[in-house]
Image: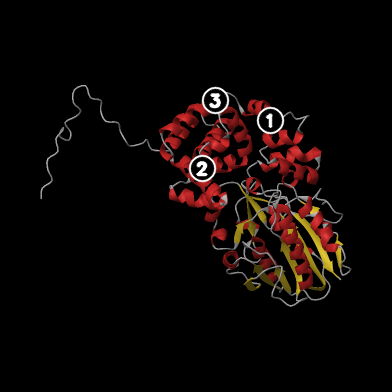
Amino acid sequence: MAEPRRRGRRPGQGPRPGQRPAARTSRPPTDPARTAALAVLQAVRVDNAYANLALPAALRDHGLSGRDAAFTTELVSGTLRMRGTYDAVLGACVDRSLNKVEAKVLDALRIGAHQLLSMRVPPHAAISTTVDLARARVGAGAAAFTNAVLRKVSEHDLDTWVERVAPDRDKDPSGHAAVAHSHPRWVVDELRKAVGPDELEALLAADNAAPRVTLVARPGRATPAELPGEPTAYSPYGVVLEGGDPASVPAVADGRAGVQDEGSQLVAVALAAAPLEGPDNTWLDLCAGPGGKASLLAAIAAGRGAGLVASERQPHRARLVARALQGSDGVLGVVAADGVRPPYRPGSFDRVLVDAPCTGLGALRRRPEARWRRRPDDLLELVLLQRGLVGAALELVRPGGVVLYATCSPVLAETAGVVRSVLTGRSDVELEDAAPLLPQVPDAAGPLPGTLQLWPHRHGTDAMFLALLRRR
């Protein structure tokens, strides 16, 4: 049956006299780079994703490369690093609590604030593109709100805003530092205990500096000379990549080299440098995921005729370790096992690395979202786990063998506190001086005599802590 003819104007006939044209329903296209950045921020917020893992997928999905990819990367990392400062500024420009602002709109506002206060983006471009983003993702009302708020943000530069919204430095030093350097107050307090008040500002500033990409040449498989960039200051295996995509480096593409922070490289270097008497055949990485340190350790071990067992509790992370170790000599096996209750015979290893799960507050340059995820209550659970892992490692190492406890955190409870607790009541374990393991690294004394602490503001590395324990 034919559809009955509808009364009204024929298509293309136009509006009746005096009638307004129908409003267009299509929205203006949004900038792909900013759209990708918003997608990553949403993944970090909703899915607890790591930005450095979510970013490559977003760049591929939006077809971004070169300068556009670099722009998106800066939007994501910069917005996450400075979120605390931007939220204080936005709070002064909004007539309600930020908790009552729709999360997607707040993500867009933070992106706009970063462009206005920390990037060389013209104000009209920063505002208009962010307004388009809010309109496309939420609606016209959100766009008008975003426009009004960002216009207020644009009235002052970042230093002026910090003076206006941060607590008084003399009356509330932690509160001022928390806003000025975009760290939660409790993190500021923990870092002050670890580094001291004189270096606190330098450390907080270093946490907000974008890290350079560092590559590692796995010995026996690649050399630093075949990698682009300048040699690292302390690691004999590293180079600093000046630009470009690391995946495009041939040695990285085929697994003979990888991306690894210099501090992480130095952990493997230190364990391998510890003197041993007797056999030196079997090494263990007790918390190996995702596999960076294990790959370097396996390569060093292979050059000495030794072998490495890589152990990781989470099966999916154990698979990442196995993938990282593909093609490596010196691998005795990759095992998915609980490091606190490991399935190995006591005394069966000569060297053991315990790179324990931690707050990650030593890697805030590379994982800026960690500062907003961690809570003070996390510390107790992590410290108990760290103690359990070190205790298990000491049972696994033979008499005369060594355990290197490392953690990517300078928080005293996770460093000196763990070592003191493990040593209490154990007459068969002694803390040895780790300084001779890394004689090329200056000014790295740790919180306990004989321990080492690397710092981003002193050494340009993650804030890695190292303690060498020997089983007697």
Picture quarter containing residue 280? bottom right
Q: Tell me which residue sits at (67%, 61%) in the image.
A: 293
Q: Residue furthest right?
A: 427
Left or right side of 289 for 269: right
Q: Mark 1 points at which residue?
A: 166
Earlier sequence position, callout 3 versus callout 2: 2
Which residue appears farthest toward the left when viewing the image?
A: 1
Q: Mark 3 points at which residue?
A: 152
Secondary structure at badge 1 equals: loop
Disc 3 residue type (three-letter): Lys
Q: Earlier in the sequence, mark 1 or mark 3?
A: 3
Of the numbered discs in the image, which one, if any, rests on residue 72?
A: 2
Q: Is residue 429 above or below residue 406?
A: below
Circle 2 SS class:
helix
Mark 2 residue type: Thr
The amino acid at mark 1 is Ala
Q: Picture quarter containing residue 226?
A: bottom right
Query: Is 5 rendered above or below residue 438?
Result: above
Q: Are marks 1 and 2 in contact (CB under 8 Å)?
A: no
Looking at the image, is 92 positioned above or below residue 297? above
Badge 3 vs badge 2, beta-carbon distance below 8 Å: no
Answer few, some or many: residues within 10 Å of disc 2's Cα (few below 14, many 20 plus, some between 14 and 19): many
Task: State whether residue 450 is above or below residue 203.
Answer: below
